[in-house]
Amino acid sequence: MLRDTLKTLLSAWGPSGGEHGVADTIKELLGGHVDSMRTDVMGNLIVEKYGTDDNAKRIMISAHMDQIGLVVTSVEKEGYLRVHNVGGIGMKASEYRRVVFENGVEGVLVSQPVQQGEAKLKDMFIDIGAQDREEALSMVQLGDVAVYAPEIFSLGKHRVSAPGMDDRCACALLVELLLYAEDQKNTIVGVFSTQEEVGLRGAKVAAYALEPDLGIGLDVTAWGDTPETKLPDIKLGAGPAVKIMDSSMIATPMVRDALFDAAEAAGVAVQREVLPFGGTDGAAIQHARGGIPSGTLSIPCRYVHSACETIDMRDMEGALKVLLQFVNIV
Amino acid sequence: MDLKQLTDLHGPSGNERAVRRAIVEAAKPLADEVKIDRSGNVICLKKGTNPDKPAVMVAAHMDEVGFIIAGYTEEGLLRFRPVGGIDPRVIVSKWVAIGDDNIPGVIGALAIHLQSADDRKRVLKYNDLYIDIGAKDQKEAEKLCPLGTYAAFDTPYAEFGDGFVCAKALDDRVGCYNLLRLLEDRYPGDLYCCFVTQEEIGLRGSQGAAYHVPAGIGIALEGTAAGDLGDVKEQFHITRPGQGVAVSFMDRASIADRELYRQVLALAEGAGIRHQIKQGVTGGNDAGSLQVGGGGRKTIVFSVPCRYIHSGASVAKLSDIDDQLALTREYLNNL
């Protein structure tokens, strides 16, 4: 089930600022199974499932819908598209990639020869097979965004690889949580957020408006278990990770510890995450209003921000169990 | 108030007082309410004619890039640092006005005769530069320009050539100028014209305005970079003076609301307002604060292309400034 939901969400097109397609997909998956569903001015999809307790806490759980992409900034006479990154796009991961626009136009991302050093994004262009500027502009407009073309495949028995795993795997988790949580004590305020990759912008707005009692960011984290990769000390398949800190926040101890407690109660092994970089929606929640207790549950993910972001479904299943406990015990 | 009067005023980030005073004076007869908030922003309300229409906030920043006095030499020269992003290569031998009394100063560096061959290849850094106010000694320099005194480019305003203007602080007095002109009319919805502080050092003033101004739509009126210069490849032109107001789909601080972006381009087409799409993602502006502040709002950025932006002499086309106003008016009238 989790795997099917994941595949459905990975197939949706949704760079930062253009997440509506992902939101529509989620609405279809959740329709009729939740207590309320709405979209705010930033395009965040906000879904609630009420808790049964008289003093139910409102827990904002945020997973971002957006993925990294490339925005068209100019079109050359010869029909090539010049682009700028939307979120953290790496050169090595991008060269010769197949990319796709919202309207289905496909292209390949190529670097022109450079005099010295490594190619930068300004040296890259997208070839969409147009003969000249006029033909190119009949296919795409300035400001249109391309993402790595979805290519979803299994690695071994447990692992799945695809572009956009960051953060559709967390969207899948949140969808499943909202579907399977039943008569839970606390209210789940699920936020499928926008524009995380460009600065946690959607979650900031949602956290301010929703003013939850506490918050959880759901996101991927980096890995340290491939050759010559040392930090963070995180392994795929060893369970979801409870964030201690990253460069955007130090998890609120109460929330962090409640996640550990939930994992223990669920009988799920978890990893402790100390990430020397990065940030998640958890931070946006923590810093909203006058401050909101907040933490992050992470899915270990290899090759983050490439077209082959890879996770282990056992970590996903573990995370779902932890979350189902968490909404009952805090 | 005309553009010359506005660019002649000095207001580096954090020291917008002179600009604010002049704007309050000019706005009072035009607006229904004029308030100064705790961030030093001037918030002017022009009430709408139709209470069913949404309120809009339009922001332009009063501050400009400049300098701050950070030390002295025994000879009475001033050491200084930039306030906002200024390329040190464009400031040598430029006149500046220092402090509230506009004390004249000139930015100095070692003359060519005294430089070694290596010196001449090296880009001068702020540590290699001084502001010379002709002071007798360190004591006199300290007295005239105490630590923390601001300095601003002191360049005359000039209209020249084929409808171009050259001045300092076009970023963002063009926006302030148009905000004042917007206040001359009344629109269907409530209009909040927000003259904000400290944009150049991190969109700081607009964060306060974004929090307390009750409007669900935000427009930033800006000056933005133009790179349409001989040797620069087309892909790096970003904007081109003379081709109309620049509409942004995205920059470093915000992504335009998709619907608003499309609506605005359709309005510009329909009304025959000259416009161009900003061909790049460089720079960030107050739309970044407006979009995420106070519960969030839809935002869009309208910019006037400025060559040599963030220098003592930037160049814009007067018709682009009028086009920025025309597009903003068109939007406000068609809510």
Image: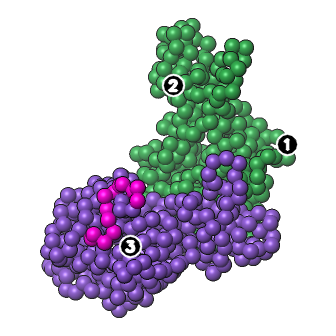
Chain colours: A purple, B green
A231 within the magenta span: yes
Circle 2 marks a residue in which chain? Answer: B
> Which of the 4 image quadrants contains residue A189?
bottom left
Q: Position of residue A220 (x, y in %)?
A: 37, 67
Which residue carries the number 3 mark?
A311
User: Dot 3, how many residues are within 10 Å of its Cα: few (below 14), some (14-19), or many (20+)?
Assistant: many
Q: Amino acid at mark 1?
A: Gly
Q: Amino acid at mark 2?
A: Ile
Q: Are marks 1 and 2 in contact (CB under 8 Å)?
A: no
A150 within the magenta span: no
How many marks can you see? 3
Q: Residue at x 79, y 40 (%)?
A: B159
Residue numbers of the magenta segment = A227-239
Q: Amino acid at mark 3?
A: Ile
Relative vertical location of residue A150 with respect to residue B38 in this rendering, above or below? below
Q: Residue at x 27, y 71 (%)?
A: A239
Q: Nearer the viewer, mark 1 or mark 2?
A: 2
Q: Are marks 3 and 2 on the same chain?
A: no
Observer able to see residue B190: no
Which residue is at the front of the view, A278 or B214? A278
Q: Which mark is residue B69?
A: 2
User: Dot 1, how many residues are within 10 Å of its Cα: few (below 14), some (14-19), or many (20+)?
Assistant: few
Circle 1 marks a residue in which chain? Answer: B
Nearer the N terminus, badge 1 or badge 2? 2
Observer able to see residue A274: yes
